[in-house]
Structure formats: structure tokens, C-alpha cells
Image (tube, grey):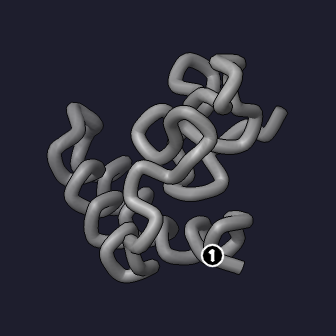
Amino acid sequence: MNKFCQSCGMPLEKHQGTETDGTLSNEYCEMCYRDGQFIEPNITFDQMLKRGIDGLNNSQRNLFSKKFMIWGYPYQLKKLARWR
């Protein structure tokens, strides 16, 4: 199993999406993938980047952690299977 969603980068530990047969996905999270399909199949890289940054800004993390994660997010996203 991948450690992070290959679409948005969210940790998969407790947030796995589902395949068509109901099994948990080893590639994608529940926010990106359900019943063997992407929830938003036409989302662009830039839209996903904005969504991730907005999520980090709204998180409960401390300011330093947020800024560091926001800085690194575009680089992480580019390495994920969906965006290669």
C-alpha cells in the first residue's frame, strides 16, 4: 500500500477510498476515489493544488508547520501517480 493518496497526497492510514467491489483502495483516499472511480475525474492539477493549500491553511497545525507544508505541497503533488 502507498503511504499517501496518489491523487492529493493525504495519508492513507485511515482514509482509504474504495474499489468497485467495496475493498479499500491502496492508491487513493476517500476524498478522491470511491467505488473504483475518481470523485472528480476532470479536476486539474491547479485545482487540486488550490484545494490542498486551502485545506492546509484551514488545518489546526501551527503556523510554521502550515507554511512549510504549503511550500512543499506543489513538489509532493507533482510526484503522485495521478499527476505524472
The amino acid marked with disc number 1 is Trp
Q: Quadrant of residue 80?
A: bottom right
User: What's the residue at 47%, 32% (across, down)?
Assistant: 30
Q: Nearer the viewer, residue 51 or 32?
A: 32
Q: Is residue 41 visible from the viewing direction of this image?
A: yes
Q: Tell me: 70 left or right of 1.
A: left
Q: How many marks?
A: 1
Q: Is residue 16 above or below residue 65?
A: above
Q: Nearer the viewer, residue 55 or 62?
A: 55
Q: Residue at x 21, y 32 (%)?
A: 60
To which quarter of the image does residue 53 belong? bottom left
As rendered, which of 71 and 19 lies closer to the eye? 19
- Which residue is tagged 1? 83
Using the rendered image of the protein, determine whether residue 11 is visible from the camera's viewpoint: no
Residue 22 picture location, percent across and down: 64, 18
**Quadrant of the snapshot with the N terminus:** top right
Q: What kind of element bears circle 1? A: helix
Question: With 69 as the anchor, is 59 left or right in this view?
Answer: left
Residue lying farthest right?
A: 1
Q: Position of residue 34 (x, y in %)?
A: 50, 36
| Mark 1 Cα-neighbour bin, 10 Å: few <14, some 14–19, many ≥20 | few
**Rendered location of residue 35, percent (x, y):** 55, 33
Q: Residue at x 56, y 68 (%)?
A: 77
User: Who is closer to the viewer here, 28 or 80?
Assistant: 28
Residue 42 is situated, as x and y percent measured from the top left of the image, at 41, 73
Q: Residue furthest front?
A: 21
Q: Residue at x 71, y 79 (%)?
A: 84
Is 49 placed above or below 13 here?
A: below
Left or right placement of residue 69 versus residue 83 in this view = left
